[in-house]
Image (cartoon, rainbow, N blue to C red):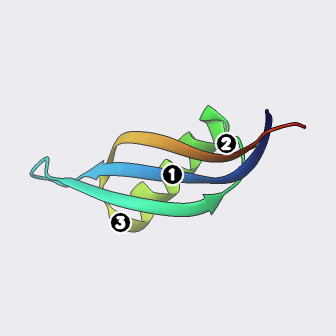
Amino acid sequence: MNTTWNKTNLTVTMLDADDQKIRFSYSNIIEKPSDDQITKFAAVIEKLTNLSFGTASITTTDNKTQVA
């Protein structure tokens, strides 16, 4: 089987002052974001929203095709 990258999605969960979770979802980001890139991106969201970083999750979608 051949694997071809299709898309990567990022979900960042932030916490407000009352520890309520607020999710931000980003579609079609780069193929393999590094931990450093995600950390820096979360820091930007913190500054823009005045929320605290909670967690981040990455979902990657690949296409699989059978080789003849």
Contact? badges 2 and 1 (CB < 8 Å): yes
Q: Name above or below for residue 46 compared with residue 1.
A: below
Find the residue positioned furthest to the left. Answer: 18
Picture residue at 48% right of the left edge, 49% below the top: 42
Q: Name above or below for residue 38 compared with residue 44.
A: above
Mark 3, residues whose alpha carbon is within 10 Å: few (<14), some, or many (≥20)? few
Q: Residue at label 3?
A: 49
Q: Quadrant of residue 33?
A: top right
Picture residue at 72% right of the left edge, 47% below the top: 31
Find the residue positioned furthest to the bottom. Answer: 48
Picture residue at 51% right of the left edge, 51% below the top: 10
Depth order, front residue of 64/18: 64
Q: Assign a secondary structure to mark 1.
A: strand
Amino acid type, mark 2? Pro
Identify the mark at residue 51; answer none if there is no mark: none
Q: Considering the image in quadrants, where does the C terminus appear? A: top right
Instruction: For marks 2 and 3, give the CA distance.
Output: 22 Å
Mark 2, residues whose alpha carbon is within 10 Å: few (<14), some, or many (≥20)? few
Amino acid type, mark 1? Leu
Please name which of the two marks, 3 or 1, marks the residue nearer to the observer: 1
Q: Residue at label 2?
A: 33
